[in-house]
Amino acid sequence: MGLEAKYDYSPRMYRRVVFAAAQAVSFRDAAEALDELGELKLLPKRVWRAAKRIGEERVEECRAVAARYEELPLPAQRQSPAAHGQAPQVACVQMDGGRFQQRERIAGEPPAQPLDLPNEESAVESQEDGSWCEYKAGVLMSMTSKVHAEDPCPELPTTFADPAKMRKIAREIKGFTHESAVSMAAEEEAGSDFKEADGRPETLVKSVVATSGDVEAFGPLLVNAAYERGFNAAPRKAFVADGSSTNWGVWRRYFSHYTPILDFVHALMYVYAAAMAGRTANEGWSFYRDWSQWLWQGQVGRLLTALGQRQLELGLPEKRETGTPRAQLASSLSYLTNQRERMKYPEYRKLGLPITSSPIESTVKQINRRIKGTEKFWSEGADPMLHLVADRLSQTDVTAKFWARRLDRIIGSASYQQAA
């Protein structure tokens, strides 16, 4: 058994500590789990320091690999690594964002301690001491599906043609224009006609990338992750996201050779809001029923014409006008117009491509379980922990490979010594 000089436990035990830190809701819970299951008694602060150290190593490793990828010429970037195996039938990349609370360190303040432990003496006790920041996450999925000569599902799924279900979905995701989990909420209400629809691709293996860095830092991490998994050799490739300009900026810069797909449920909710704007429920539903079917069938021009006619009836909103029927209609019309080239849903279904972003929304929810909370504040360590959580959620062997590389690196170094 070997020990690292700075720590009094073996690399194997070190790995267990870091796994518990990424798996548990807090460092305190991780410490309790290690004590109960591994008979390893560590203070939560010790767990945090171990996780932060390894997370920082992962951050540096990912940045270095992404930098090497960016140095490749464009033709090489669009190929797959020689060592990669068979390419998937379908490669899908999705991205979204989440939030966490950050506290800026004050000059002269001692080094930060675990900030998800509100009862610790060093923890932040007031929510006013923090501010909400955004992190970015991506999910990469190898998938399998069939290609169809005709649209395998030409009729709108009954979930989205049911007035009661649509009212419930709209109510649960009120304010959907700023809500990231729109597609996931709708899918939870959906029936088998949507979840098991003919032609819907099946996910085989997913991997996850996450960082608190800006889009300039996130983009290279995401595209390198796709490159390493051999996605460029896939015969069918899709990039699925909501309408955020940040998402489509990443697509334009790094994934323009992927089919761009706007999450169908986000588009549908804008159609629903436009149909209901300024109308009674019964009146609005009669319009929504037609408009939603047009959206599903890719008749975007027809849909936009109908919304334009409705805008002539209501009039244009005043500058900064919000919350009114004409403001909602204007918002829907603008959103759908800007995204019209990414709403060719019959074509995507024929190609066996995914049309919802529920996988990334579910992933963000899982990350939030560890990172986000009114009682959790990060002045440092958020980015390292995001990398560790992303590794844990990945179904590839990224974690095992990292620990193998790390062990090989330290065995011959001065930081590694044999236990007495």
Image: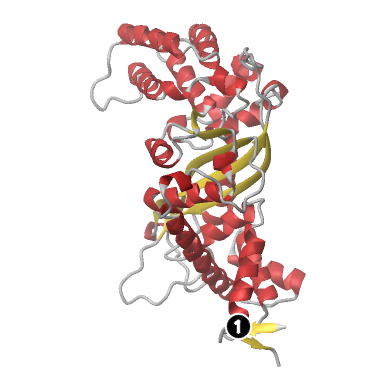
Residue 16 drawn above or below residue 382: below
List the single residue furthest toward the bottom: 420
Is 244 left or right of 85, judged from the image as shown?
A: left
Q: Nearer the viewer, residue 392 or 237?
A: 237
| Residue depicted at x 53% and y 55% | 371
Q: Quadrant of residue 32?
A: bottom right
Residue 284 drawn above or below residue 172: above
Check disc 1 and report the residue beneath it: 412
Is 29 left or right of 106, judged from the image as shown?
A: right
Residue 340 drawn above or below residue 66: above
The C terminus, quarter of image: bottom right
| Residue depicted at x 65% and y 74% | 14
Is 40 left or right of 90, judged from the image as shown?
A: right
Please say whether residue 300 is visible from this viewpoint.
yes
List the single residue furthest toward the left: 319
- Residue 367 in picture, x, y percent from top left: 56, 51
| Residue depicted at x 42% and y 11% | 301
Color style of the picture: secondary structure
- Residue 232 in picture, x, y percent from top left: 54, 41
Q: Nearer the viewer, residue 323 or 113?
A: 113
| Residue depicted at x 45% and y 58% | 68
Callout 1, which amino acid? Gly
- Residue 93 in picture, x, y percent from top left: 54, 40
Residue 206 drawn above or below residue 399: above
Is 261 left or right of 161, judged from the image as shown?
A: left
The N terminus, quarter of image: bottom right
- Residue 380 in picture, x, y percent from top left: 44, 66
**Label 1 SS:** loop
Q: Quadrant of residue 213?
A: bottom left
Local crowd size for mark 1, using a 10 Å CA cut-off: few (<14), some (14–19), many (≥20): few
Please say whether residue 382 is visible from this viewpoint.
no
